[in-house]
């Protein structure tokens, strides 16, 4: 359980205007759509709360990521509510810099729905030392 | 001391640790790829069985109360069936569904997002205190609040306090009232006592606990007893007996998971920069299994395979038995301890620890010579969200960018 309730209580990103997801915030309250807090990413994934609003997830789960992440079936943002995913994607589409932990601007964003997901902990020699999430029952995919 | 210095596996080279991790990864992939309709049949059968038992219990209690000759046997049989139904619901169904073990079936009803279990703690708070805090920081002193549930001193590294003298009593109370102890678990009473709890979060949590606890109490102590009409109290007693039975059973099973001799505790320094194989090793060395019949395993939610559950918390519980054969082989191959024994022995060891650690270390002997009281004094309670954040800096460049 987190301090804010629902999407409306999330702080606004000063650069992009959209809601700052719970996973994009540090515990001191500073947050930005540009970054991901690894600690909160793990917390959301394991306690099965929405990575944006911090409330219990619903069914099906929705993953927000890039086309490349979908091709690899490895997402970096843990599951979200559909409405939360849409609100964040509306803010990040077309951003001229890297957002949600991406190194640079993203051309194509996707929202996928899935029954469940697998949590991949990073390996010692992984160039990418962040946790990843692999849908294990892909239901739908759409570009945003 | 880093986790790589834990003496139980200092005989392994870094390459062997990586190799062990790769073998465990392969085992996990094998199970993930072989999940099928037989597994789904298993959980649906379990849910039907549990609901059948609960319905039969409620009807037996309601109807038998009206006749003098059936009242007492009805209360005993109905209460027993209800106790078993609650045990099945909490252990084999609720705990495992809320881990997401059955999410791959894509059934909205049998899903980690939607399951609300038959106990006082709200599912949402359980998923935080258990799935996240306990499974991520397993047996790390000062982090994992399941070590003694914030009430009992369970590790020799923990500082002794005169209050600990009462441990045998607190333990008995915790066991009897277990569902209510668990209900308060995610509140983190130690943080509230220290004034470190976010008042907004506390208010939301208290409201949720109050609503769930009231619903549970009304169900078992008002609505169902009302079906017994003038013999209301007979059903109240039977329902209370069912709840206490479930409390005692789940307490015993949970205490057998990490407190028998051989299950190790860790310190925060040991988990910094932990790799995936090291995470596996901490889960293996910090958990303890127990042996028994298939029925015993079902009634304990397959938590007799605690080692396997901690290695792979999201794999379906009905597969832990077959996984355990392979994990045990790996432990033999890599000369690692695999802690197991009969249930009574494992619980006996946990109980002995509770009693022994009610006294300062100098009055008792430890199973590990390298641990001295005060050598690593660890505060009670768990770390606040802020402390957890600053202590786990492996957030890579993204965390660095945020600060
Ligand atoms: Zn949300």
Image: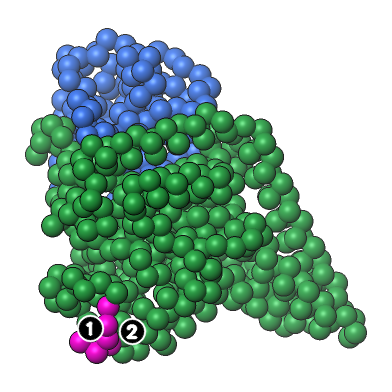
Chain colours: A blue, B green
Residue at the (80%, 63%) spot, across then down: B56
Which element carries disc 2, helix, strand or loop? helix
Real-space CA distance between mark 2 and mark 1, rounded to the nearest whole angstrom: 8 Å
Residue A59: horizontal and vertical position, in percent?
52, 35
Image vertical order of residue B365 relative to residue B192, above or below? below
Quarter of the rendering containing residue B65: bottom right
Query: Which residue corresponds to mark 2?
Result: B356
Image vertical order of residue B391 relative to residue B290, above or below? above
Q: Is A6 in front, or is A26?
A: A26
Residue B384: horizontal and vertical position, in percent?
22, 59
Residue numbers of the magenta segment: B359-366
Which element carries disc 1, helix, strand or loop? helix
Q: Which chain carries label 1?
A: B
- For label 2, being within 8 Å of ligand 1 is answered no
Residue at the (85%, 75%) spot, across then down: B64
Callout 2 crowding tier (Cα within 10 Å): few <14, some 14–19, many ≥20: many
- For label 1, being within 8 Å of ligand 1 is answered no
Looking at the rendered structure, the number of numbered marks drawn on it comes to 2
Query: Which residue corresponds to mark 1?
Result: B361
Residue at the (77%, 78%) spot, across then down: B75
């Amino acid at each position: 359980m987190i301090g804010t309730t629902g999407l409306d209580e999330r702080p606004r990103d000063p650069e992009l205007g959209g809601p700052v997801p719970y996973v994009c915030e540090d515990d001191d309250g500073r947050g930005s759509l540009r970054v991901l807090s690894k600690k909160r990413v793990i917390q959301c994934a394991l306690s099965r709360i929405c990575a944006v609003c911090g409330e219990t997830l619903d069914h099906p789960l929705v993953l927000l990521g890039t086309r490349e992440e979908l091709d690899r079936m490895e997402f970096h943002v843990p599951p979200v509510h559909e409405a939360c995913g849409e609100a964040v994607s509306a803010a990040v589409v077309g951003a001229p810099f890297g957002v949600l932990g991406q190194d640079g601007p993203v051309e194509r964003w996707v929202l996928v729905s899935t029954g469940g997901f697998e949590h991949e902990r990073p390996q010692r020699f992984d160039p990418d030392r962040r946790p990843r999430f692999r849908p294990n029952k892909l239901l739908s995919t759409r570009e945003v | 001391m880093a986790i790589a210095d834990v003496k139980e596996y200092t005989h392994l080279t870094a390459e062997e640790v990586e190799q062990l991790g790769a073998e465990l990864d392969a085992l996990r992939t094998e199970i993930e790829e072989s999940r099928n309709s037989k597994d789904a049949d298993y959980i649906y059968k379990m849910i039907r069985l549990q609901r059948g038992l609960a319905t039969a219990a409620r009807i037996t209690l309601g109807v038998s109360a009206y006749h003098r000759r059936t009242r007492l046997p009805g209360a005993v049989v109905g209460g027993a069936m209800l106790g078993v139904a609650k045990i099945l619901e909490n252990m084999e169904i609720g705990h495992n569904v809320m881990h997401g073990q059955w999410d791959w079936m894509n059934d909205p009803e049998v899903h980690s997002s939607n399951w609300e279990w038959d106990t006082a703690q709200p599912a949402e708070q359980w998923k935080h205190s258990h799935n996240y805090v306990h499974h991520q920081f397993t047996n790390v002193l000062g982090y994992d609040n399941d070590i003694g549930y914030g009430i009992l001193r369970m590790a020799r590294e923990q500082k002794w306090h005169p209050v600990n003298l009462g441990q045998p009593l607190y333990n008995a109370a915790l066991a009897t009232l277990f569902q209510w102890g668990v209900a308060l678990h995610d509140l983190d009473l130690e943080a509230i006592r220290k004034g470190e709890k976010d008042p907004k979060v506390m208010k939301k949590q208290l409201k949720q606990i109050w609503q769930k606890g009231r619903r549970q109490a009304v169900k078992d102590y008002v609505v169902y007893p009302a079906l017994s009409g003038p013999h209301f109290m007979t059903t109240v007693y039977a329902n209370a007996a069912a709840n206490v039975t479930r409390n005692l059973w789940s307490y015993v099973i949970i205490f057998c998971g990490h407190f028998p001799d051989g299950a190790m505790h860790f310190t925060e320094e040991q988990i910094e920069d932990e790799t995936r194989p090291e995470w596996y090793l901490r889960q293996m060395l910090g958990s303890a299994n127990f042996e028994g019949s298939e029925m015993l395993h079902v009634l304990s939610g397959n938590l007799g395979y605690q080692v396997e559950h901690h290695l792979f918390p999201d794999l379906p519980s009905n597969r832990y038995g077959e996984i355990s054969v392979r994990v045990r082989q790996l432990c033999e191959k890599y000369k690692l301890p695999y802690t197991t024994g009969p249930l009574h022995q494992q619980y006996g060891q946990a109980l002995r620890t509770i009693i022994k650690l009610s006294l300062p270390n100098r009055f008792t002997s430890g199973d590990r010579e390298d641990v001295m009281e005060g050598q690593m004094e660890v505060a009670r309670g768990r770390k606040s969200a802020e402390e957890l954040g600053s202590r786990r800096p492996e957030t890579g460049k993204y965390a660095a960018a945020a600060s």
